[in-house]
Image (tube, helix red, strand yellow):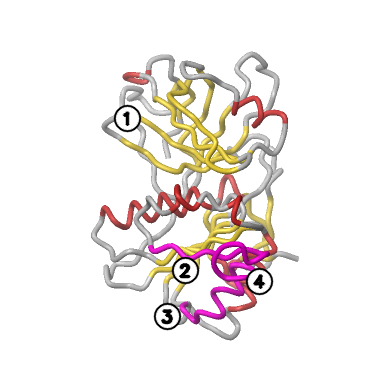
Amino acid sequence: MRKRFAELTVLDQHEIAPELFHARFQLPEDNENAVSDSDNSREVPSFLPGNFLMLRCEPADPYRLMRPMSVLAFDRAARTIDILYSTVGDQTRRLSLAPPGTRLPAVFPLGNHFDIPQEKSTLIVLVAGGVGLPPLLFLASHLGEHGFQRPALFVGARDDSQLARGFIERWSADSHFATDDGSQGFRGTVVDHLEAEGVLAGAWVYACGPRAMLRRLQGLFDAVAPARCQVSLEEMMACGTGACYGCAVGSDAQGMEAHQLVCRDGPVFELAQVRFD
């Protein structure tokens, strides 16, 4: 994949739930001020569901590490990239205060992407927990644009205030909600909800969320076998390019124990091959 280093311009951002922000960025025209590892720096980059970017949240502080951000949406004609992020630390809080016109250094596109089935009538289930929504909403849009039936999207949160339900329901998916306290939808975790609904058998499943959620989902497959399950893993990253080895995860690829890097080998993996111990 051809990577770029360029400054993205903040077009707009707003809070859609407590400490959860939706931001839209403009790519530079003709990749102005961009450096590419290809010979054609004017080519508009391409993003697919699962790809991510590394973004510097504070342009005035070049010594801060960039932060990994999953791509929520990409408009090739308008040259815009959308992300969804949570203000979990100092850098993301600074990002949330960046006004329109702010230029932020970024490296993109990074990572691999979700595979999609050949048969457009395939039952597809998306499972999101925490801040795992962006790659799955991007995937839902991508599937709709390519003629697939609407996927079932299961979203879990602590309570109703964390769901951003109005935002989620604008996307091309049939949404189902679970909250720990029962304030919206199913009372319990999103994996409890999936188990109660019995929708996984024979489906193509895509998931993104906390390790605890993915571990429980993996355990559920011992009793209910989906056709396939791919997950986008969330890990702390320092470089995003495989240089620092800070995002290693255990893997049982082809039955042999191994470690893979989320930034270089992922972030999308087959759930059956991920080790969470």
Residue 183 position by quadrant: bottom right
Mark 1 burial class by Cα count in 10 Å: few <14, some 14-19, many 20+? some
Is 101 above or below relative to 140?
A: above
Residue located at (64% from left, 70% from top): 188
106 sits left or right of 173 in the view: right
Q: Amino acid at mark 4?
A: Arg
Viewport quadrant of the C terminus: bottom right
Cβ atoms at labels 2 and 1 below 8 Å apart: no
Frontmost residue, 258 versus 233 = 233
Cβ atoms at labels 3 and 1 below 8 Å apart: no
Alpha carbon distance from label 1 to label 4: 39 Å
Q: Which residues are magenta?
A: 174-199
* Labels 2, 1: front one: 2
In this view, the residue farthest toward the right is: 277
SS class, disc 3? loop
Mark 2 burial class by Cα count in 10 Å: few <14, some 14-19, many 20+? many
SS class, disc 2? strand
Q: Which mark is residue 216?
A: 4
Of labels 2 and 4, earlier in sequence is 2
Q: Amino acid at mark 3?
A: Gly
Q: Residue tagged by mark 1?
A: 44
* Labels 3, 1: front one: 3
Q: Residue tagged by mark 3?
A: 202
Of labels 2 and 1, earlier in sequence is 1
Mark 4 burial class by Cα count in 10 Å: few <14, some 14-19, many 20+? few
Q: Residue tagged by mark 2?
A: 205
Residue 218 position by quadrant: bottom right
Alpha carbon distance from label 2 to label 4: 14 Å
Q: Amino acid at mark 2?
A: Val
Residue located at (40% from left, 60% from top): 115
In this view, the residue farthest toward the bottom is: 223
